């Protein structure tokens, strides 16, 4: 009994010095749900193919999902739809419509699938390098969450800039016009 008490007291004394177990890393889904309330207009969420570059702007966080791209797009849009504060502004690579099935098997099915998935949203297209530049610039001041998928078809990334759900671009333009004239409501 005496040995037991000695061991117990030694353990109590040295236990705080033992290395703590690291907290489990959240899954990409958990990270999206965790981040959504903190994100706002001017933040971005990118759902990218497996060759998308690791960017070094300070605000860019990259997570490897090991998931199908369509699954990640659906989950992000679903999470965003449940939010009270942000809506998606979607941009895709203009190169995608020129990628041939011969050079990238599966591109036709992907184009059809993503068109159907995003049918309720306006989608703009820009050259890939221009979008990456916008993201890098945004990452200098704002958080960018990059969700890297197992997609292996080029130019398939979905770039989502978050905008305010309860204040439209038109409302902002009207506000700025009133401010310029000095008219109050």
Image: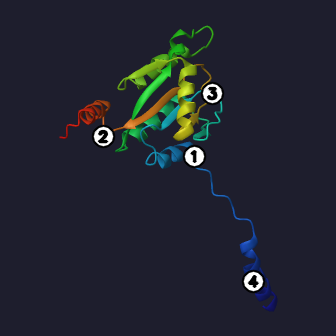
- Residue bearing mark 1: 27
Residue 29 in picture, x, y percent from top left: 52, 43
Q: Nearer the viewer, residue 182 or 98?
A: 182
Q: CA distance from mark 4 to mark 2?
A: 59 Å
Q: Relative to 71, say whether 14 is above or below.
A: below
The mark closer to the camera, 3 or 2, is 2
Q: CA distance from mark 3 to mark 2?
A: 32 Å
- Residue bearing mark 4: 8
Q: Counting other residues with Cα less than 10 Å from the Cα at mark 1, is it few (<14), some (14-19), or many (20 or more)?
A: few
Q: Counting other residues with Cα less than 10 Å from the Cα at mark 3, is it few (<14), some (14-19), or many (20 or more)?
A: some
Q: Quadrant of residue 168?
A: top left
Q: Relative to 36, say whether 152 is above or below.
A: above
The disc at residue 166 is: 2
Residue 68 visible in the current orientation? no
Q: Nearer the viewer, residue 156 or 40?
A: 40
- Give the quadrant of the C terminus: top left
Q: Nearer the viewer, residue 179 or 87?
A: 179
Q: Counting other residues with Cα less than 10 Å from the Cα at mark 2, is it few (<14), some (14-19), or many (20 or more)?
A: few
Q: Is disc 1 placed on a helix, strand or loop?
A: loop
Residue reaching furthest right? 3
Residue under the image location 65 percent in, 26 percent down: 51
- Give the quadrant of the N terminus: bottom right
């Amino acid at each position: 009994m005496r040995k037991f008490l000695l061991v117990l007291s030694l353990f109590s004394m040295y236990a705080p010095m033992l290395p703590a177990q690291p907290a489990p890393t959240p899954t990409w889904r958990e990270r999206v749900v965790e981040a959504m309330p903190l994100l706002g207009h001017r933040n971005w969420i990118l759902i990218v193919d497996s060759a998308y570059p690791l960017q070094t702007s300070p605000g860019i966080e990259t997570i490897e999902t090991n998931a199908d791209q369509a699954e990640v797009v659906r989950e992000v849009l679903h999470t965003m739809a449940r939010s009270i504060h942000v809506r998606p502004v979607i941009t895709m690579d203009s190169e995608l419509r020129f990628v041939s099935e011969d050079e990238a098997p599966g591109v036709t099915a992907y184009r059809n699938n993503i068109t159907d998935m995003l049918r309720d949203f306006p989608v703009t297209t820009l050259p890939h390098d221009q979008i990456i530049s916008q993201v890098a610039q945004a990452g200098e001041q704002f958080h960018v969450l990059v969700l890297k998928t197992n997609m292996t078809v080029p130019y398939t990334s979905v770039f989502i800039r978050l905008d305010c759900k309860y204040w439209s671009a038109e409302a902002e333009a009207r506000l700025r016009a009133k401010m310029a004239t000095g008219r109050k409501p």
